[in-house]
Amino acid sequence: MADLLAEWTEPLFRQHMLLASDDVDEIRLRVAELLNDHILEPRGATLAARLHGVKAGVLSVCMLEYGEAVTVEETRPAGEFLLLQMPLSGSVDIECDEGSWTAGPGSGVILPSNMPHRLDWKAGATQIILKVPLGRLYAEYGSLTGVHPGKPLKFNRRIDLGSGDGEQWNALMRYFCEQAAQPSPLGWLKARVAEEALMRHLLCAQSISLREHYFGGDCAQVPKRLRRAREFIEAHLHEGISLDDIAEHSGTSLRSLSRMCQLQYGASPMQLLRNLRLDKIRQELLSASVDSNVSEVAMRWGYTHLGRFAAAYRKRFGEAPNETRQAGAAAVRMHSVLAGSETVTSKARSSSRRNT
């Protein structure tokens, strides 16, 4: 993942240099203007700082390297934004009253915005740093939950850039930075869309506050309740079950069930039920013969309104049920032909061996 991050960031950011200096005061001043006020203490002989950056909308991203080992002390937290640090090379140790972390290639850290902290950059460290205004992040939180957090957002500080969420983060970061660094006729609009996606992904992947809002304080029980709900749905796909039935079996309220399901699957419990039914129908159509009846298959899996079924099927799979059935029948015929051919070949080989 670190290689993937470096693959696009380095060539892109090298075109947008903001600073190249070995003067400690100049470096501190320029970095403070872009990020936050701090004390900079070189621990090596000679600095060779390079600062590159792009900005679009409310987000700004920079690539920073000092060339030497340095200590950075954020003594006066701004409290107005988050800084996310993701090393491309080298490593950085972070310490504050909340805890300590080490970030290296393949990982990142969300710095606390409400307390002083100390960062020890190792020699040769290069980092991508994203600056996110808290006010804008709170607005996105409100859009996702319908409420204002009311207190500072809590985050899992460490970011695993090698996880599925990390791969998605890399893709979103790349899209945003490309729009900011390479303007196009609609680049500003694309950057705005990417900006919103980045902040929402950050909240969904890293925010403890968002998980507590949807799941309540007892997060450990959420997977079990949600698993029970899905197992019940899968066991009764042929039947006419209701949302009340699912909630009662999973042992949770309708509201909590809906929130958990939306966060985990991006769908309501009943939409999940419909999606699983459509998946089963597709599996059956793909393995069906040419004379299989689509309507009978759909009704067997709980779809009684065939017009709605056809529309839902096309929306989910991008094709009509009949097209899937025809493709499945063709595949079945081809398999039969190949199997028959193999049988004939096998018999011919046996005959040849006997004659020999």
Image (cartoon, grey):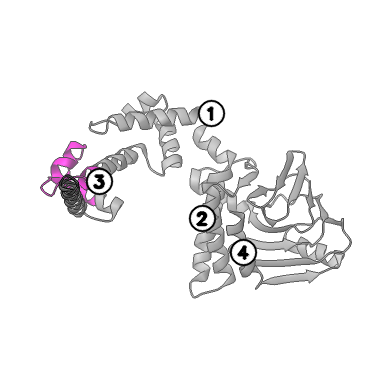
- For mark 2, give the secondary structure: helix
Of pointers 1 and 3, the one earlier in the residue sequence? 1
Q: Nearer the viewer, residue 131 or 101?
A: 101
For label 4, the residue is: 9
For label 1, the residue is: 220
Question: Closer to the observer: label 2 or label 4?
Answer: 4
Of pointers 1 and 4, the one earlier in the residue sequence? 4
Q: Give the residue type that dot 2 points to.
A: Ala
Where residue 193 sits in the image (x, y, percent)?
Answer: 49, 61
Pointers 2 and 3 in contact (CB under 8 A)? no
Q: Nearer the viewer, residue 146 or 187?
A: 187
Q: Give the residue type that dot 4 points to.
A: Thr
For label 3, the residue is: 282
Question: Closer to the observer: label 2 or label 3?
Answer: 3
- For mark 3, give the secondary structure: helix
Distance CA(mark 2)–CA(mark 3): 31 Å
Lateral position of residue 267 relative to residue 171, left or right: left
Disc 2 packing (10 Å; few <14; some 14–19; many ≥20): some
Q: Give the residue type that dot 3 points to.
A: Arg
- Say which quarter of the image contains residue 29: bottom right
Lateral position of residue 311 relative to residue 160, left or right: left
Residue depicted at x 69% and y 50%: 104
Of all residues shown, which one is farthest toward the front? 356
Q: Which residues are magenta?
A: 282-311
